[in-house]
Image (spheres, grey):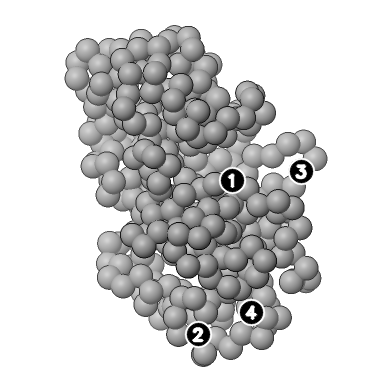
Amino acid sequence: MSRAQLAQQIFQGKLLDFEDVALAVFRYQAQHNELYAHFLDLLGVSTSKVSKIPQIPFLPIQFFKSHTLQTGKWNAAVTFSSSGTTGKTTSRHHIRKLLDYRINSINGFNSFYGNVQDYAVFALLPSYLERSGSSLVYMADQFIKASKYPQSDFFLDNLGELAKELADCERKGIPSLLLGVSFALLDFAEQFPMPLSHTLLMETGGMKGRRKEMTREELHGVLKKAFQLSEIHSEYGMTELLSQGYSKGNGLFYPIDSMQVYIRDVTDPFTQMPKGRVGGINIIDLANLDSCAFIATDDLGRGYEDGSFEVLGRLDNSDIRGCNLLVV
C-alpha cells in the first residue's frame, strides 16, 4: 500500500480495521525506514512472516534521541523536541506534514469531547511556552485557533488574567477547556480557587522540577477541591507521538482511533503481557506514518480488554534499556 493510500485511511476518517492498517504501515516502514529496517534485520524478523500485531517488533524510544527516524525521503516541515535538563540529550521528532498532526489531534479530541470549536480554550503551559519545538504547544495552538471564542489564548505567568477570563466564561455559561501542565495548575489552584461548573480541566502531567512530585491521585485531589470539580481530565502524549490518550478521571486513559497500547514483559521486551498485567508500555501510533509507528516507551503501565490503559510510572534505567540492540 502506498503512503497516499495509508494517509487517506489514517488521517481522513477512513480507518476501518486497525490491525489491517497497522500491518500495512509495518510493511511500508520496514521497506522505507532505514533505521527500522536495520533493527528488524538484527532481530532476524522476516517481514513476510508478520501477520498479526503481536509479531511486530517495537523500536525502543531512545532512538528518537540518537538517530533521525524517517520513513521515505523528504524534508521536515518542523522538528518537535522534548524538554530536558541541561546536558541531557532530547528526543527529536521530524514531521513531514503539520496538517496531518493538526487533523489527527483535533479529530482525536473531538471524538472524546465534542467539537473543540465549541470551547473557549485556555492553555496554561509555561514550561513548554518558554522553549521552542513543543508538540503540545502546537496542538494547543490548533485548539485555540479552532475555537470560536475570542477569549481563547495561551497564559504564561499572567494567572490573574486567566482567572478573570475563566470567571467571565463561567458567568456566561460558556463551555471552557483549561489545558495545563501540573505545576502551573497547582499554582493557579492556590492563588485563584473558584468553582468551575462549565470548565473541563485537563492536566498534561509534569512538575518539570518546579514542585515536589506527587501522585496523580494527590494532584487531582488538590485540583478537585480548589475548583469544586468531581473529575479531573488528563492527556497522555509525548514528543515521539502524534496521537494522544485521554482520561476522564480515575487514571484510565483511552487512546484516540489512530493509537493502540500494548504491554510488554519488562524482562523480555519481545513478549506481550496478558491484559491486566503490569509491564512496559508499547504504542502503535499510526499517525507516525513518516517516522516510526511502533514504539517501546519508557513508561510502566497496565492495559485492559476495552483498550484503556493506566500509566503507573517510569521504567528504571530506561536510558540504557534496549539500546544495545542496534548500533549504526
Residue 271, how many percent across, how many down? 58, 73
Q: Mark 4 or mark 1, which has the lower sequence index?
A: 4
Q: Where is residue 303 in the image (x, y as percent from the top left)?
A: 45, 58
Marks 3,2: beta carbons within 8 A: no
Q: Alpha carbon of mark 1 to alpha carbon of mark 3: how far?
A: 20 Å
Mark on residue 313? Answer: 1
Disc on res. 40: 4
What amino acid does circle 4 point to? Leu
Point out which mark residue 88 bears: 3
**What is the number of the mark on residue 166?**
none
Tell me the CA gap for discs 1 and 2: 31 Å
Looking at the image, is mark 4 or mark 2 earlier in the sequence?
4
Circle nearer the viewer, 1 or 3: 1
- In the rendered image, the vertical position of residue 162 relative to residue 13, given as above or below: above
| Disc 3 secondary structure class | loop
> Which of disc 3 and disc 1 is earlier in sequence?
3
**Residue labelled with disc 2:** 50
Image quadrant for the C terminus?
A: bottom right
Is 283 on the left or on the right of 213, as rendered?
Answer: left
Give coordinates of residue 63: x percent, y percent. 68, 61
Going 52% across and 67% down the picture, which residue do you hit? Answer: 273
Q: How many marks?
A: 4
Neighbour class for label 3 at 10 Å: few (<14), some, many (≥20)? few
Disc 4, SS: helix
> Given the image, on which type of amino acid does mark 3 rest?
Lys
